[in-house]
Amino acid sequence: MVDARKLRARLRWSQKDMAEFVGCDQATVSRIERGQEPSGPVGRMLEVLLAEVTAGRIKPKPGSAPSEHGAAA
């Protein structure tokens, strides 16, 4: 399973940013980060996102990392 919190921190994305990419809402990202298993499509999109980041095709946002709940630090 993809560690959504670590992946999001690596990208310097807010929970809202990640939610928009994977096709869910911010509350779902929050639940996944707290340990809830993602649904099939959301879980698959997290796997795709990790693969794209690992391959260098998706880069982190410039600047500081977002806070825990998605607002810029």
Image: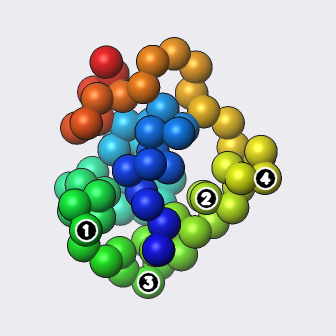
- The image shows residue 9, relative to residue 36, as above or below, that is above
Question: Is residue 25 something one can see in this rendering?
Answer: no
Question: Is residue 51 something one can see in this rendering?
Answer: yes
Q: Nearer the viewer, mark 3 or mark 2?
A: 2
Residue bearing the label numbered 4: 55
Which amino acid type corresponds to the residue marked 4 in the rendered image? Ala
Cα distance, mark 3 to mark 2?
Answer: 15 Å
Residue bearing the label numbered 2: 50
Q: Quadrant of residue 39?
A: bottom left
Q: Nearer the viewer, mark 3 or mark 4?
A: 4
Residue bearing the label numbered 3: 40
How many numbered marks have been drawn onto this rendered protein structure? 4
Which amino acid type corresponds to the residue marked 2 in the rendered image? Leu
Q: Secondary structure at mark 2?
A: helix
Around disc 2, counting alpha carbons within 10 Å, would you say few (fewer than 14), some (14 to 19), or many (20 or more)?
Answer: some
Which residue appears at 24% of the width and 54% of the height? 30
The picture places residue 73, in percent across and down from the top left corner, at 31, 18
Badge 4 vs badge 2, beta-carbon distance below 8 Å: no
Q: Quadrant of residue 48?
A: bottom right
- The colour scheme is rainbow
Q: Secondary structure at mark 3?
A: helix
The picture places residue 66, in percent across and down from the top left corner, at 36, 28
Residue bearing the label numbered 1: 35
